[in-house]
Image (tube, rainbow, N blue to C red):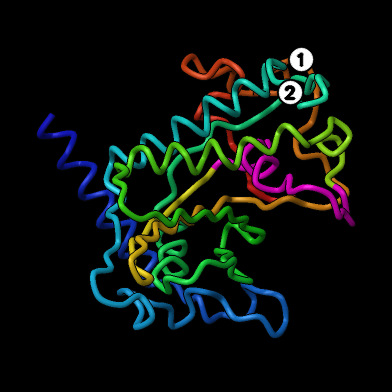
Protein backbone atom coordinates (compact mmCIF):
# COMPACT_ATOMS: atom_id res chain seq x y z
CA UNK A 1 0.00 0.00 0.00
CA UNK A 2 2.77 2.43 0.83
CA UNK A 3 4.49 1.73 -2.47
CA UNK A 4 1.25 2.26 -4.42
CA UNK A 5 0.58 5.53 -2.66
CA UNK A 6 4.10 6.74 -3.32
CA UNK A 7 3.89 5.87 -7.01
CA UNK A 8 0.54 7.66 -7.32
CA UNK A 9 1.89 10.74 -5.58
CA UNK A 10 4.92 10.95 -7.85
CA UNK A 11 2.72 10.51 -10.93
CA UNK A 12 0.38 13.23 -9.71
CA UNK A 13 3.28 15.63 -9.11
CA UNK A 14 4.65 14.99 -12.59
CA UNK A 15 1.21 15.52 -14.15
CA UNK A 16 0.71 18.78 -12.30
CA UNK A 17 4.14 19.99 -13.38
CA UNK A 18 3.29 19.24 -17.00
CA UNK A 19 0.02 21.20 -16.85
CA UNK A 20 1.75 24.16 -15.29
CA UNK A 21 4.28 24.09 -18.13
CA UNK A 22 1.56 24.12 -20.81
CA UNK A 23 0.98 27.39 -22.64
CA UNK A 24 -2.76 27.93 -22.31
CA UNK A 25 -2.42 31.38 -23.86
CA UNK A 26 -1.59 29.72 -27.19
CA UNK A 27 -4.31 31.11 -29.52
CA UNK A 28 -4.47 27.84 -31.45
CA UNK A 29 -6.19 26.17 -28.47
CA UNK A 30 -9.39 28.23 -28.79
CA UNK A 31 -11.67 29.72 -31.40
CA UNK A 32 -10.59 33.07 -32.78
CA UNK A 33 -10.99 35.84 -30.22
CA UNK A 34 -11.74 33.46 -27.34
CA UNK A 35 -9.47 33.31 -24.30
CA UNK A 36 -8.62 30.04 -22.58
CA UNK A 37 -9.86 29.83 -18.99
CA UNK A 38 -6.37 28.77 -17.85
CA UNK A 39 -4.54 31.55 -19.73
CA UNK A 40 -3.14 33.47 -16.77
CA UNK A 41 -5.80 31.56 -14.85
CA UNK A 42 -6.33 31.45 -11.12
CA UNK A 43 -3.95 29.22 -9.18
CA UNK A 44 -5.64 30.12 -5.87
CA UNK A 45 -9.17 31.17 -4.98
CA UNK A 46 -10.23 34.46 -6.55
CA UNK A 47 -11.04 37.63 -4.66
CA UNK A 48 -14.76 37.14 -5.35
CA UNK A 49 -14.80 33.97 -3.23
CA UNK A 50 -14.70 35.81 0.08
CA UNK A 51 -13.91 34.79 3.64
CA UNK A 52 -14.35 31.17 4.63
CA UNK A 53 -13.98 29.86 1.09
CA UNK A 54 -11.81 26.87 0.25
CA UNK A 55 -11.02 24.46 -2.56
CA UNK A 56 -11.92 20.83 -2.00
CA UNK A 57 -8.85 18.74 -2.76
CA UNK A 58 -9.66 16.10 -5.36
CA UNK A 59 -7.83 13.26 -3.62
CA UNK A 60 -7.78 9.70 -4.90
CA UNK A 61 -11.02 8.73 -3.14
CA UNK A 62 -12.97 11.59 -4.73
CA UNK A 63 -11.44 10.90 -8.13
CA UNK A 64 -12.46 7.26 -7.84
CA UNK A 65 -16.01 8.15 -6.80
CA UNK A 66 -16.42 10.49 -9.76
CA UNK A 67 -14.95 8.09 -12.31
CA UNK A 68 -16.75 5.05 -10.90
CA UNK A 69 -20.19 6.65 -10.87
CA UNK A 70 -19.74 8.04 -14.38
CA UNK A 71 -18.68 4.63 -15.68
CA UNK A 72 -21.51 2.78 -13.95
CA UNK A 73 -24.02 5.12 -15.58
CA UNK A 74 -22.27 4.93 -18.95
CA UNK A 75 -22.23 1.14 -18.80
CA UNK A 76 -25.94 0.99 -17.97
CA UNK A 77 -26.79 3.06 -21.03
CA UNK A 78 -24.30 1.24 -23.26
CA UNK A 79 -25.86 -2.10 -22.34
CA UNK A 80 -29.30 -0.88 -23.42
CA UNK A 81 -30.66 -0.92 -19.87
CA UNK A 82 -31.85 2.70 -19.72
CA UNK A 83 -35.15 4.11 -20.97
CA UNK A 84 -36.29 7.73 -21.02
CA UNK A 85 -39.39 9.17 -19.35
CA UNK A 86 -41.51 8.17 -22.33
CA UNK A 87 -40.39 4.53 -21.95
CA UNK A 88 -38.23 4.72 -25.07
CA UNK A 89 -35.21 2.50 -24.54
CA UNK A 90 -31.80 3.81 -25.58
CA UNK A 91 -29.93 1.52 -27.94
CA UNK A 92 -26.79 -0.35 -26.98
CA UNK A 93 -23.44 1.32 -27.68
CA UNK A 94 -20.92 -0.41 -29.92
CA UNK A 95 -17.79 1.28 -28.55
CA UNK A 96 -18.23 3.40 -25.45
CA UNK A 97 -14.93 4.21 -23.75
CA UNK A 98 -14.20 3.79 -20.05
CA UNK A 99 -13.68 7.22 -18.48
CA UNK A 100 -10.34 7.74 -16.76
CA UNK A 101 -9.14 10.62 -14.59
CA UNK A 102 -7.11 13.29 -16.37
CA UNK A 103 -5.00 15.64 -14.19
CA UNK A 104 -4.79 18.30 -16.90
CA UNK A 105 -8.55 18.51 -17.34
CA UNK A 106 -8.87 18.70 -13.54
CA UNK A 107 -6.31 21.51 -13.39
CA UNK A 108 -8.21 23.50 -16.01
CA UNK A 109 -11.55 22.82 -14.29
CA UNK A 110 -10.07 24.28 -11.11
CA UNK A 111 -9.26 27.56 -12.86
CA UNK A 112 -12.97 27.91 -13.54
CA UNK A 113 -14.13 26.84 -10.08
CA UNK A 114 -11.70 29.17 -8.29
CA UNK A 115 -13.64 32.16 -9.59
CA UNK A 116 -16.53 31.16 -7.29
CA UNK A 117 -18.88 32.16 -10.10
CA UNK A 118 -21.34 29.65 -11.51
CA UNK A 119 -20.91 29.60 -15.28
CA UNK A 120 -19.36 27.74 -18.19
CA UNK A 121 -16.08 29.02 -19.55
CA UNK A 122 -15.74 29.45 -23.29
CA UNK A 123 -12.55 27.43 -23.85
CA UNK A 124 -10.90 24.63 -21.87
CA UNK A 125 -9.11 22.73 -24.64
CA UNK A 126 -5.71 21.05 -24.40
CA UNK A 127 -3.06 20.23 -26.97
CA UNK A 128 -4.51 16.72 -27.38
CA UNK A 129 -8.18 17.43 -26.59
CA UNK A 130 -9.20 20.21 -28.96
CA UNK A 131 -12.94 20.06 -28.24
CA UNK A 132 -13.13 19.57 -24.48
CA UNK A 133 -16.58 19.56 -22.88
CA UNK A 134 -17.87 20.67 -19.50
CA UNK A 135 -20.60 20.02 -16.95
CA UNK A 136 -21.14 22.35 -13.99
CA UNK A 137 -23.36 22.20 -10.92
CA UNK A 138 -23.93 24.19 -7.74
CA UNK A 139 -25.75 23.59 -4.47
CA UNK A 140 -26.64 26.41 -2.09
CA UNK A 141 -27.81 25.49 1.39
CA UNK A 142 -28.36 26.92 4.84
CA UNK A 143 -28.62 25.17 8.20
CA UNK A 144 -27.76 21.75 6.75
CA UNK A 145 -24.68 19.60 6.34
CA UNK A 146 -23.65 17.46 3.40
CA UNK A 147 -20.53 15.36 2.96
CA UNK A 148 -18.47 15.91 -0.17
CA UNK A 149 -19.30 12.35 -1.20
CA UNK A 150 -23.02 13.13 -0.97
CA UNK A 151 -22.64 16.28 -3.03
CA UNK A 152 -20.52 14.69 -5.75
CA UNK A 153 -23.02 11.84 -6.09
CA UNK A 154 -25.96 14.25 -6.17
CA UNK A 155 -24.35 16.45 -8.82
CA UNK A 156 -23.52 13.59 -11.18
CA UNK A 157 -26.92 11.92 -10.75
CA UNK A 158 -28.60 15.27 -11.39
CA UNK A 159 -26.76 15.61 -14.70
CA UNK A 160 -27.64 12.06 -15.63
CA UNK A 161 -31.34 12.57 -14.78
CA UNK A 162 -31.73 14.45 -18.05
CA UNK A 163 -32.11 11.00 -19.65
CA UNK A 164 -35.80 11.40 -18.83
CA UNK A 165 -36.28 14.09 -21.50
CA UNK A 166 -33.67 12.87 -24.00
CA UNK A 167 -34.83 10.91 -27.05
CA UNK A 168 -33.07 8.12 -28.94
CA UNK A 169 -33.15 10.41 -31.98
CA UNK A 170 -31.10 13.02 -30.11
CA UNK A 171 -28.59 10.33 -29.18
CA UNK A 172 -28.35 9.31 -32.85
CA UNK A 173 -27.66 12.92 -33.86
CA UNK A 174 -27.05 15.69 -31.34
CA UNK A 175 -29.42 18.54 -32.30
CA UNK A 176 -27.97 21.66 -33.90
CA UNK A 177 -30.82 23.89 -32.72
CA UNK A 178 -32.82 22.87 -29.69
CA UNK A 179 -35.11 24.84 -27.39
CA UNK A 180 -36.46 22.07 -25.16
CA UNK A 181 -35.50 20.85 -21.68
CA UNK A 182 -31.79 20.49 -20.96
CA UNK A 183 -30.20 17.29 -22.28
CA UNK A 184 -26.54 18.29 -22.70
CA UNK A 185 -25.32 17.17 -19.27
CA UNK A 186 -26.67 13.65 -19.84
CA UNK A 187 -25.34 13.43 -23.38
CA UNK A 188 -21.94 14.62 -22.18
CA UNK A 189 -21.84 11.79 -19.64
CA UNK A 190 -22.62 9.12 -22.26
CA UNK A 191 -20.49 10.45 -25.13
CA UNK A 192 -18.73 7.36 -26.48
CA UNK A 193 -15.60 9.16 -27.70
CA UNK A 194 -14.98 10.78 -24.33
CA UNK A 195 -12.38 8.81 -22.37
CA UNK A 196 -10.99 11.47 -20.02
CA UNK A 197 -12.47 13.50 -17.17
CA UNK A 198 -11.10 15.93 -14.60
CA UNK A 199 -13.07 17.85 -11.97
CA UNK A 200 -12.76 20.49 -9.25
CA UNK A 201 -14.96 21.75 -6.43
CA UNK A 202 -14.91 24.86 -4.24
CA UNK A 203 -16.90 25.99 -1.22
CA UNK A 204 -17.78 29.63 -0.62
CA UNK A 205 -20.39 31.70 1.20
CA UNK A 206 -22.97 34.18 0.01
CA UNK A 207 -24.61 35.69 3.05
CA UNK A 208 -25.78 32.84 5.29
CA UNK A 209 -25.71 30.32 2.45
CA UNK A 210 -22.91 27.87 1.72
CA UNK A 211 -22.30 27.27 -1.98
CA UNK A 212 -20.58 24.18 -3.36
CA UNK A 213 -19.56 24.69 -6.99
CA UNK A 214 -18.56 21.61 -9.00
CA UNK A 215 -16.91 21.70 -12.45
CA UNK A 216 -16.07 18.67 -14.59
CA UNK A 217 -14.20 18.84 -17.90
CA UNK A 218 -14.39 16.03 -20.46
CA UNK A 219 -12.14 15.01 -23.33
CA UNK A 220 -14.81 15.73 -25.95
CA UNK A 221 -17.89 17.94 -25.90
CA UNK A 222 -21.26 17.34 -27.56
CA UNK A 223 -20.81 17.70 -31.33
CA UNK A 224 -23.88 18.84 -33.27
CA UNK A 225 -25.17 16.60 -36.05
CA UNK A 226 -22.99 13.75 -34.82
CA UNK A 227 -24.08 10.77 -32.72
CA UNK A 228 -23.59 11.02 -28.97
CA UNK A 229 -22.62 7.39 -29.29
CA UNK A 230 -22.71 4.92 -32.16
CA UNK A 231 -25.37 2.25 -31.66
CA UNK A 232 -24.52 -1.42 -32.07
CA UNK A 233 -24.17 -4.62 -30.12
CA UNK A 234 -22.54 -3.77 -26.82
CA UNK A 235 -18.73 -3.69 -27.04
CA UNK A 236 -18.85 -4.97 -30.62
CA UNK A 237 -16.56 -2.14 -31.75
CA UNK A 238 -14.10 -2.37 -28.86
CA UNK A 239 -10.73 -3.48 -30.22
CA UNK A 240 -9.45 -4.18 -26.70
CA UNK A 241 -12.53 -6.08 -25.54
CA UNK A 242 -15.00 -5.25 -22.80
CA UNK A 243 -14.23 -3.87 -19.36
CA UNK A 244 -14.69 -6.58 -16.73
CA UNK A 245 -15.90 -4.07 -14.12
CA UNK A 246 -18.13 -2.04 -16.46
CA UNK A 247 -19.31 -4.63 -19.02
CA UNK A 248 -20.96 -2.08 -21.30
CA UNK A 249 -17.68 -0.21 -21.83
CA UNK A 250 -14.44 -0.89 -23.66
CA UNK A 251 -11.35 -2.01 -21.79
CA UNK A 252 -9.21 0.81 -20.40
CA UNK A 253 -6.53 -0.13 -22.96
CA UNK A 254 -8.83 1.04 -25.78
CA UNK A 255 -7.24 3.90 -27.72
CA UNK A 256 -9.77 6.75 -27.93
CA UNK A 257 -8.74 10.04 -29.54
CA UNK A 258 -11.31 12.33 -27.85
CA UNK A 259 -11.89 14.02 -31.21
CA UNK A 260 -14.99 14.45 -33.41
SS at circle 1: loop
**Distance of label 1 from label 2 (alpha carbons):** 5 Å
Residue at 20% over, 48% down: 9
Q: Which residue is mark 2?
A: 94
Residue at 50% over, 75% down: 24
Percent coordinates x, y for residue 225 in the rendering: 88, 49
Percent coordinates x, y for residue 119 in the rendering: 57, 67
Task: Please say whether residue 53 is one of the residues in the magenta stretch.
Answer: no
For the record, the magenta segment spans 175-195
Percent coordinates x, y for residue 217 in the rendering: 53, 54
Side of 66 relative to 145 (left or right): right
Q: Few, some or many C-alpha atoms within 10 Å of disc 2 (few <14, some 14-19, many ≥20)?
A: many
SS at circle 2: loop
Q: Few, some or many C-alpha atoms within 10 Å of disc 1 (few <14, some 14-19, many ≥20)?
A: some
**Front-most of residues 144 and 127:** 144
Q: Which residue is mark 1?
A: 233
Residue at 81% over, 19% down: 87
Is 57 located above or below residue 76 in the figure? Answer: below
Kindly report the secondary structure that dominates the magenta region of the rendered protein: loop
Amino acid sequence: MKVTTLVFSIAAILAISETQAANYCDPSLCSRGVSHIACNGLTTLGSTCGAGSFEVGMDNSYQQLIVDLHNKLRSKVAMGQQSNGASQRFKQAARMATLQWDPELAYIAATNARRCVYGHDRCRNTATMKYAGQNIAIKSYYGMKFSNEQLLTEFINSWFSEYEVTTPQQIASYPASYRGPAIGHFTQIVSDRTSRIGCAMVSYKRGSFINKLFVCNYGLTNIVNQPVYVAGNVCSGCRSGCNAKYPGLCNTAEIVRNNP
